[in-house]
Amino acid sequence: MPIRPIALQRGDTIGIVTLGSPPERNEVETGIEMLEDMGFNTLLGRYVYARDGFLAGTEQERAMDLMSMFANPQVKLILPTRGGVGVAGVLPYLNYPFIQRNAKIISGYSDITVLLNALYQSAHLTTFHSLMLVDFNPSTPEYNFNQFFAAVSSPTPTRQIHNPPEIPLKSKVPGNVTGPIVGGNLTSLIGTIGTPFEIDTEGKILLLEDTHEPINTLFRYIEQLRMAGKFQDCIGIVMGQCTECQESYGKTYEDLINEFIVPLRKPLMTNLATAHGTYKAAIPIGAMVNLNTLNNTLTVLEPTTIPPFYK
């Protein structure tokens, strides 16, 4: 069983870090204001506003900020400001045994995907494919906050992941499988192939989603995952939405799924509202889940945090 962090409570401190691309200052300030209005304290990393072209400071600086949050006993949740690019660069500079001994909640998506999976694989930590600081703003749907806090603040034994009613989950290939769920942003995951942080899908349920990519580019990524054995190794597949993904040569994202994912004959669920979409389900990376495409359900089977009094 992976290590579960301590559940988040009102009054706890949230550490803010930038691990990829630099954020806009007003987005950070808006997020901090909302978190503090919700009853949390916030602590900004030293390099939150650093800029080095399309990166937020050097790899070492960004890794140092992250490690400082794991080292701070007051910090209960580590919240990246945004994703972007460059998160993989911090991975070689992290102290995974130290992180394992100082487990904390960490949430994000987009390029943060590579960190979430690396922390699960190398530090055995349950992480959360869910909100980032930029999502704490007045336009975020209540669904997103409900999903987030259900995942990080409620140590319930089981939790069924529901889409909003107007966005139906779709089961494409029948089956009923149980295993840890891994994955996230397809573009980011492809960048780990051939590195020490390559995603491990053996015996696991694989989640994939993306945004703003032409369909022929997504096909290339899917083919690379297939040739790397990632679909052969996994036991089931959950395809999230692909927001603003451009039709190519008359082919759509739905066509890509039907023509190249369905024939893999793994239990397959599609249309999960997650990550880059308006609505964002909270997926605990590394937690045991049941994917039942016979009754169209995705269920988290274990608590993903522990109560504070267990500390």
Image: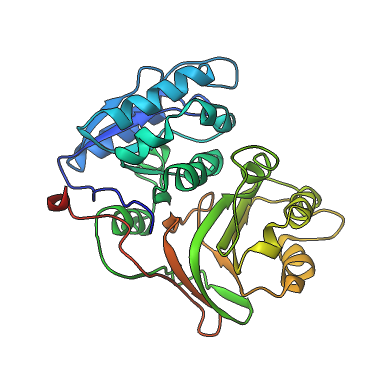
Classify the position of the N terminus by image quarter.
Answer: bottom left
On the rendered structure, is 142 left or right of 23? left
Rendered residue at 52%/27% (across/down): 90
Question: Which residue extends farthest right?
Answer: 249
On the rendered structure, is 31 left or right of 63? left
In this view of the protein, which residue sits in the foreground, 144 or 106? 106
Rendered residue at 34%/22% (across/down): 45
Rendered residue at 41%/50% (across/down): 128
Give residue 307's position: percent from left, percent from top. 18, 55
Q: In which quarter of the image is residue 299?
A: bottom left
Rendered residue at 58%/29% (across/down): 86
Give residue 2's position: percent from left, percent from top. 38, 54
In this view of the protein, which residue sits in the foreground, 44 or 97? 97
On the rendered structure, is 49 left or right of 266? left
Tell me the colour scheme of the image.
Answer: rainbow
Give residue 30's position: percent from left, percent from top. 33, 32
Q: In the picture shown, does residue 219 fall above or below 187?
A: below
Residue 130 visible in the shown view: no
Q: Quadrant of residue 205?
A: bottom right
